[in-house]
Amino acid sequence: MNGIIKKYDPEAMLIGEAPCTKDLITITDKDFKVVNAVSIGAVFLIILFVFKSISLPVILVAVIEFAIFINLGIPCYTGTRLPFIASIVIGTIQLGATVDYAILMTTRYKKERCSGKEKRDAIQIALSTSMTSVIVSACGFFAATFGVGLYSDIDMISSLCTLMARGAIISMLVVIFILPSMLMVFDKAICSTTKEMRGIKFIGGHHHEE
């Protein structure tokens, strides 16, 4: 219809609910990508500043984005239609929620590692001490959004709340199961690229501090 109307008048505009929605989706798509990139960049810089590390921001952002991708990928397999604003809303909210869980566990891991613990012991302590807080926080987030998503008659609100509820559980599982594994695998790189952990030396699988 736009093509036909432009043939008669280049200045003509198609109006109505459908064209308005289409224009909104087209115009905001670029803005959403920019906002998502800025959000990730801001979180990266915050983690970089807090931990004074090059590798930890990369690992934590990768883990967080993995949780978000899982959450947004599930509707593709379940055949669920999502509102066009879902990706940016869930991307920012789940990013903010998951980074708290990740920073909590990583802070304890770094503390234990700097105090002289082996990487396995440091990760086990970090996991055991942080797990309760992560589970309580995630379950609270889930409880606050699941009910609204279940009972709301407004499709957009229902879809977004359902995504947030599911995202809280996915984030919890990713931080509890995936993040410790990432810290274990990249422990040597983390120690080499983190300011307060560079004194840790590795000798035959063990370490000592200068």
Image (tube, grey):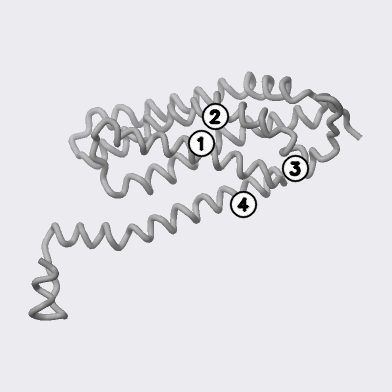
Disc on res. 124:
none
In the depicted structure, whether residue 36 falls above or below residue 158? below
* Residue that carries the numbered disc 2 in the rendered image: 175
Residue 89 locus on image (x, y percent):
37, 46
Contact (Cβ within 8 Å) of mark 2 with mark 1: yes
* Residue that carries the numbered disc 1 in the rendered image: 98
Contact (Cβ within 8 Å) of mark 4 with mark 2: no
User: What residue is shown at x 28% (from left), y 49% (from top)?
Assistant: 84
Which of the 4 quarters of the picture holds residue 154?
Answer: top left
Residue 168 locus on image (x, y percent):
43, 31
Q: CA distance from mark 4 to mark 1?
A: 16 Å
For residue 133, side relative to residue 112 (left or right): left
Disc on res. 194:
3
Which of the 4 quarters of the picture holds residue 23?
Answer: bottom left
Helix or strand or loop: what does disc 3 sit on? loop
Q: CA distance from mark 1 to mark 3?
A: 22 Å
Q: Depth check: 61 or 154 in front?
A: 61
